[in-house]
Every structure is written in C-alpha cells, then in structure tokens.
Image: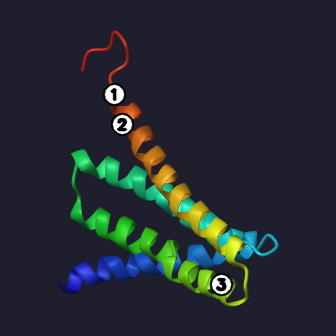
Amino acid sequence: MLATLGWVALGGAFGSLARAGVSHAIGELGEWPLGTLCVNLLGAFLLGLLLETLATRPHERLRLLLGTGVLGGFTTYSLLASQLAEQILTGELWVAAGYAAATLCGGLLASAAGVLIVQRARAPRRGEVR
C-alpha cells in the first residue's frame, strides 16, 4: 500500500507543478480561465493515450505514476468547480455554461481522440501481416 501511494505522490508532484506552469503561461482570456481549460483538455487527451496504450499491456506502476499521479495532478476539476461557482455567483451564467460545456464535451472528445490515435497506430496496415 505504501509503495502504491508513493507512485501516486511522485507523479502527482510532477503533474501539479506542470499544471501550475502551463496555467500560468497561458493565463486567462477575458472571463474564460483558458489555462485551466487547456490543462484539462490536454490531460484528457493524454489520459486517453495512456489508458489505451496500457489496455493491451497493463502495467500497474505506470498507470499509478502517469495516470493517477501525473495526469491526476495535472488536471484540475476542483479548480474547474471553483471557477464555475465564482462565475455563477457573479452572474456570469452564460460564461459558466459555456466553460462547463467546453471542458466536459472537449474532454470527452480529447480522450476519445487519444484512444483512437493509439488504436489506429496498432491497427495493421493494408497488406501488412502481423
């Protein structure tokens, strides 16, 4: 159990630092927390890539380190919830609705894209024997 927590903590530290750096570098676009949106969409894409890659070759430590740790620390749905609450409390209902939709729908599409990329990379090419 302690080793499991160690892999998650190590990855989480790197992921959180990366999130802070990316969010700071991108910043906001008007009322939109663009940095948070980009981090969550990129994280969803990378998680799709990772989980589909590990689907045929399960590796528990890699999943814990990279998936739960790095990408769990990198993405930030708690900050998303906080930003949405702030937008709603300040009367920016349409901004909040757009931001929520962009994050959730975009995240679904991003993770699906990650999965499809790995599946296509694995698929045999026409005329190729595997």
Q: Mark 1 highlights which residue?
A: 123
Give the crowd class for mark 1: few <14, some 14-19, many >=20 residues within 10 Å. few
Q: Mark 2 highlights which residue?
A: 119
Q: Quick check: 78 above or below 129?
A: below
Q: Tally the marks.
A: 3
> For the point 41% across and 53% down, which residue is it?
48
Which circle marks residue 88 in the picture? 3
Cα–Cα gap, marks 1 and 2: 6 Å
Locate residue 56: give its quadrant. top left
Q: Secondary structure at mark 1?
A: loop
Locate residue 117: give its quadrant. top left
The amino acid beneath tag 1 is: Ala
Q: Nearer the viewer, residue 13 or 119?
A: 119
Find out whether the residues at labels 1 and 2 contact each other: C-beta distance under 8 Å: yes
Q: Nearer the viewer, residue 83 or 46?
A: 83
Q: Nearer the viewer, residue 47 or 29?
A: 29
Task: Work out which quarter of the rendered image holds the N terminus and state it.
Answer: bottom left
> For the point 40% across and 32% down, which residue is it?
120
Whichever of labels 3 and 1 marks the residue nearer the N terminus, that label is 3
- Position of residue 35 measured from the top left corner of the image (x, y, whole percent): 68, 71
Which circle marks residue 84 in the picture? none
Left or right, 103 with respect to 118, comes to: right
Question: Viewer-nearest of labels 2 and 3?
Answer: 3
The amino acid beneath tag 2 is: Gln
Give the crowd class for mark 3: few <14, some 14-19, many >=20 residues within 10 Å. some
The amino acid beneath tag 3 is: Ile
> For the point 65% across and 74% down, which residue is it?
96
